[in-house]
């Protein structure tokens, strides 16, 4: 599998949703350590978001501005996550609250990234926001989130042609 296929929007969307579901499970089972998981996910989601633009820049060298815009956008989310983690380490925020706040920052950053990049990032951001609400208020939510993710992945799989139309400006 080549890099271009590996970095397709559908594959990255699948990875985001699977990592979100894993985080929902960790938030359900290990509430005291979920903040560590979501902190690492901010870095991983940043890498997932920047990788396609970086690869395209390395190949063609023509989308320098898009790469810089994306780096600046995700660095804002990273900085906010680092500040929350610093508050947590100083004892100003408890474990559960730190995890929820970092997850909410990740959800917002992903959602706002989707405004420029497409419906998959918007859905992933909304999904992360839903995970935040579920972890905070409900006791049983894993299977419902799994069902929603499965439906979204099936829809994404059968609408991969939307990516080609979006690149040409037809969508």
Image (spheres, grey):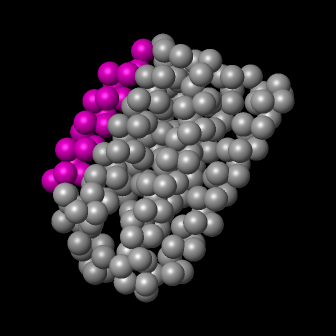
Residue occupying the point 42% across, 15% down: 140
In depth, the one of 54 and 133 nearer the eye is: 54
Residue 157 in the magenta stretch? The answer is yes
Q: In the rendered structure, which segment of residues is drawn in magenta?
A: 140-158
Q: Is residue 159 above or below residue 136?
A: below
User: Is residue 117 something one can see in this rendering?
Assistant: yes
Q: Quadrant of residue 58?
A: bottom left
Q: In this view, does 21 lie to the left or right of 104?
A: left
Residue 8 makes an appearance in the image: no
Residue at 27%, 57% (x, y): give it. Answer: 6
Where is residue 99 shown, x and y percent of the image? 63, 30
Residue 108 relative to residue 170: left or right? right
Q: Quadrant of residue 18?
A: top left
Classify the position of the C terminus by image quarter.
Answer: bottom left
Q: Residue at 25% x, 36% y: name it.
A: 150
Q: Residue at x 37, y 83 (%)?
A: 60
Residue 145 belongs to the span the image colors magenta: yes
Q: From the viewer's side, name the closer residue of 143 and 171.
A: 143
Residue 145 x, y percent position in the rendering: 36, 29
- Residue 147: percent from left, percent from top: 28, 30
How far across and down, in percent of the image, does residue 128 sit?
A: 48, 39
């Amino acid at each position: 599998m080549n890099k271009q296929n590996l970095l397709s929007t559908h594959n990255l969307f699948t990875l985001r949703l699977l990592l979100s579901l894993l985080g929902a499970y960790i938030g359900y089972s290990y509430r005291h350590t979920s903040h560590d998981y979501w902190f690492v996910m901010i870095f991983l989601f940043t890498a997932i978001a920047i990788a396609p633009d970086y690869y395209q820049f390395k190949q063609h060298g023509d989308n320098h501005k898009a790469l810089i815009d994306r780096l600046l956008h995700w660095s804002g989310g990273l900085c906010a996550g680092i500040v929350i983690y610093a508050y947590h380490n100083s004892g100003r925020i408890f474990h559960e609250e730190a995890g929820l706040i970092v997850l909410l920052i990740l959800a917002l950053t992903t959602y706002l990234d989707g405004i420029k990049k497409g419906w998959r990032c918007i859905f992933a951001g909304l999904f992360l926001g839903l995970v935040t609400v579920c972890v905070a208020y409900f006791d049983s939510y894993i299977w419902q989130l799994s069902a929603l993710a499965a439906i979204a992945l099936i829809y994404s799989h059968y609408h991969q042609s939307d990516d080609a139309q979006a690149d040409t400006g037809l969508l």
